[in-house]
Amino acid sequence: MLTVFDYLILCAMLLISVAIGIYFGCFGTKQATTKEYLHGGKKMGVIAVGVSVGVSHFSGVTMMAIPADVYKFGAYLLFINLAAILVGLLSVYVYLPVFFQLQISSSYEYLAKRFDNRTKQLAVYLYLFSEIIFFPLLAYIPALAFSATSGLSVNLTAFVVCALCIFYTTIGGLKTVVWTDFFQFIVIMVSVIINCYLGLEKSGGFMSIWDTALSGQRLINITDFNVDLTRQDSFWTMTVGYTITLASTIVVHQTGVQKYLSVSKFRHCIWSVVYSTFCKCAVSTLCVFIGLEIYAKYSDCDPLISNKIKKYDHILPYFLTEVAGQTPGILGLFVASIFSAALSSMSSLLNSIAGIIYNDLIKKRLKKEYSELTQSNILKVLIILCGVAVLLIRKFHFSSNCLSTTTHY
């Protein structure tokens, strides 16, 4: 169970995230124009943008599911890094040169230019529907982890997290989204590095982990290119399949395009892709290593078979409770990292959804040209309305039984 020190770490992470939103929303330019609110005035920092794009595509599902998958099936998820590099190359050489030259406000504007307005409208509606439905699940996973370690209500926790995210995203715009992502990435990295270190110590050292993983066939065979489609994991499913998935969720996804286009020059955009790729590879590699540590510790006594846990999805919290349960703050930092991963995705989605609704559905239908301040305020209202819709959907989801499988990878 969490201690007072653990709660303080979690609360500090949430309060700093809110403080960043208040700073950008109440000081400086106060996000008074649409360019400032949606694109950071086209003056965002290269490293901050790259880190933000990278971390916003991690979630609580990623951080809890990768170690569990590696424990059960092996380290094939390391091939995700190859997919991330391929997507980075696609971004730099295929997609972003076009988007940057057009200087579009949303990725769906390209569809109107390339095809017609009906194609764009269909894509916009499908995007909005899918993301608003998906959004509540981002809050559910960290709420579930927090509930398991604290005993507090999942519904209450998810509501508070969603409300805080809606608040700081509304008042701070893209600058808040990017810089809270940057801060939350630091929290995630500190957490996974400390967990790796503690797991290394408790699992007998690197060579013991390596030998156990090797004997248990949990290490990948880099010469295995078997095309058997019935296999759980393989080189082809991880590289080809995940490259297609990442391309759709980063390269042409509004949250990625919007951030990449917030820098002033294309070479800055290229470096943002480099930093983004590095962030994704770093976090996924560390999560895979934690999975190998877990296997080294429980290879002779599976917690699921011994009824210590109910699902493999719970194995990471159980592992951390055993190796670091007596160290104050470690569990709190872990929960804070899960919340950070979720918040980064949630804030990016809210900002991009509001931008798409306004630019692609509302702006061209307005009968007169409003001032920049008024348009900025409309965007803030849209985020609030989207947030309310998400909270209502969240209440419906959490009251149903369909979420019993949402923690599966």
Image: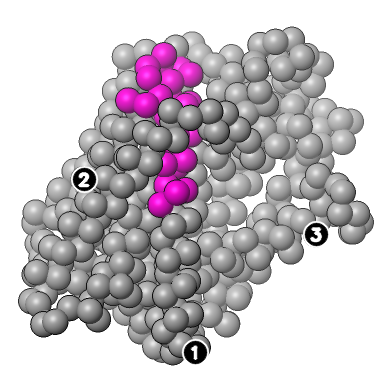
The picture places residue 353, in percent across and down from the top left corner, at 34, 61
Q: Quadrant of the C terminus?
A: top right
> Hey, what amino acid is under mark 2?
Phe
Q: Is residue 302 above or below residue 140?
A: above
Q: Which residue is mark 1?
A: 114
Element carrying mark 1:
helix
Observer-side mark, 2 or 3, equals 2
Point out which mark residue 167 bears. Answer: 2
Residue 2 percent coordinates (x, y) = 40, 15
| Residue occupying the point 91% across, 54% down | 228
Mark 2 touching mark 3, by CB under 8 A?
no
Q: List the residue tagged with mark 3.
A: 236
Label 3: which secondary element: helix
- Residue stretch rendered in magenta on the structure: 132-156
Disc 3 versus disc 1: nearer the observer: 1
- Total marks placed: 3
Query: What crowding class fits label 3: few (fewer than 14 Cα within 10 Å), some (14-19), or many (20 or more)?
Result: some
